[in-house]
Image: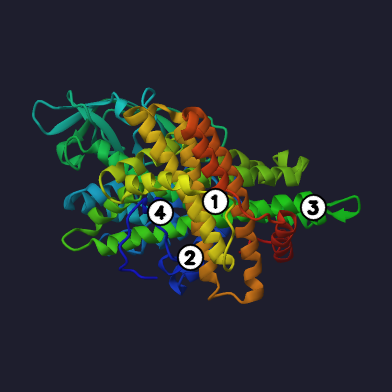
Amino acid sequence: MEKNKKVTGGEFIVKETEAKDIFIPEEFDEEQKMIAQTCRDFLDTEVFPNLDRIDQQEEGLMADLLTKAGELGLLSISLPEKYDGFEQSFVTSMLAGDVIGSGYSFAVAYSCHTGIGTLPILYYGNDQQKEKYLPKLASGEWKGAYALTEPGAGSDANAGKTKATLSEDGKYYLLNGQKMWITNSGFADIITVFAKIDNDRVLSAFIVERNFPGIVFNPEEKKMGIKGSSTRQIFFNDCKVPVENLLGNRGQGFRIALNILHMGRIKLGGNVLGAAKYAINQSVQYANERKQFGLLISTFGSIKHKLAEQVIKNFVTESAVFRASYNIDQYVEQNLEGNTKEKTTIDAFAQFAVEAAVLKVFGSDVLDYIVDENVQIHGGMGYSAELDVDRGYRDSRINRIFEGTNEINKILVVDTVLKRGAKGYFDLFGEAEKAYKDLVNLSGTPEPEGDFYTEKKQIIRNFRKIALFLIHTASEKFQRKLVYEQEILNSIADIIMLLYISESSLLRVEKLENIKDAEQIKVYKDIIDVFVYDASGKISKFAKDAIYSYAEGEVKDLLIKGTNYYTAINGVNTKEARRRIADKLIEDNKYNF
């Protein structure tokens, strides 16, 4: 890995990446592995034996678990040493989030506390605020939460109506308003609250302590899943917040909220991995025990198909998660000169907003697929509440809503690519126009060339060209009104996501050539074969859905010709490839890829 190689968020849309320039999970060092093992041990001893008690929201239990996690250092992995943290890399914090992600409702409380509950103060707080709050958040003595959403302000966060007015003596802001869906609100000591000062058009942010006068907490919400996660409405009635608890500058709250959401999205991409692996392990272990018609169901082709798909989807998601996470660390290291680490880190989250949105959408969809098939493999036992399978199924559903709905994030993928191109971060519009002009010269069917990696890279290069010529023609057609063509944006976003995930997983396998032997690497090539083959078919449909929605005449014919040309790839015996993937999972009796 070249740490000094300049990285730019979203640049994958116009530029290829080399395998040597990405990080893969197989490169975790011993310290990172020890942190991961500490997380696993904590789940095994403190969380998994108490899942029913957690879901019943036994008084004080979740707060006590967070305190214990703090005693082990699990709440302070990414915090600076001077605030009693371990100051580890973003990759390391993502690894911890991955492992803890299997902890059902505890994972939600943990992610909230260590992410949106703590990091706004780290990244935007002044020295006095950091010194007062961060050490106690790091130790778990104080628990953190984040209050942005209101009854009339969900995806449109800046529509919030909570108000802040300065008291007559100038010592306090008086908060008035209502917040809802606030995770950890049943026990949080410190809450980052967003409100508009006076008649400001944009939000400001405040550090609010639970014992400040004028706060009322509603009873716990009853939810479909994550039942052990504390979720309440909060009412502020002339809540007195000292003026020194304004977080950042006046009117900076909306920017704080956006950047923290970018961070939350990429972290969600990591959190779903642990839950997915846990569900895959449940799937294969049940399939290796359950007999029907005198045979283990793990011997049936239909079950092998499901098991293999679970593995493929998790593997490719994991590949992209740690590629993007390493890019965050690279960006921070490259831009530290003249900046604080906190400022550079928050800039990095904004820089990789495209990748964060991709991981959030793709990862949450993947987990939904995996837990659904886990239920199916278990049959009636999966639908029963006797096992944890139904808990995983119900808990997964929130991830497509958390951190901005998947619908909002898909639009964000394309909108952010366009904005970054317009600002000159990369030559989006030049490359997009070139991809369109190149369509005229296409003829026949492309012939795959070279070895496995050369061929697959050419296919992914073709995926990139489809995304680019769609961006060119849709932008030309709709200009500034493209933002209102959400169906077309969705199709382009789906293509961009498949491009990023395909490239990330191929580069991971290419890099694995230096780690695994030739026999071991075969099953990883099977994963790439199946995923890229499937992606090609999906991209063809997504592209045509978009093209038929806006293009006409010769332009339409040209775009369809280009789509057919660029998605024409050699056939793959997906049945046998999936069986080989499933056979490794069945033999290992756990996810070990």
Circle nearer the viewer, 4 or 2: 4
The answer to which of marks 4 and 2 sits earlier in the sequence is 4
Is 148 in front, or is 386?
148
Q: Which mark is residue 12?
A: 4
Quarter of the figure with the N terminus: bottom left
Amino acid identity at mark 2: Ile
Measure the C-alpha gap from mark 1 to mark 4.
33 Å
Circle nearer the viewer, 3 or 4: 4
Measure the C-alpha gap from mark 3 to mark 4.
37 Å
Residue 214 in percent (x, y) is at: 27, 28
**Which residue is labeled 1 in the image?**
103
Amino acid identity at mark 3: Gly
Q: Which mark is residue 24?
A: 2
Is 235 in front, or is 337?
337
Q: What residue sits 38% from the left and 51% below the top?
A: 114
Amino acid identity at mark 4: Phe
State the SS at label 4. helix
Is 465 in front, or is 531?
465
Measure the C-alpha gap from mark 1 to mark 3.
31 Å
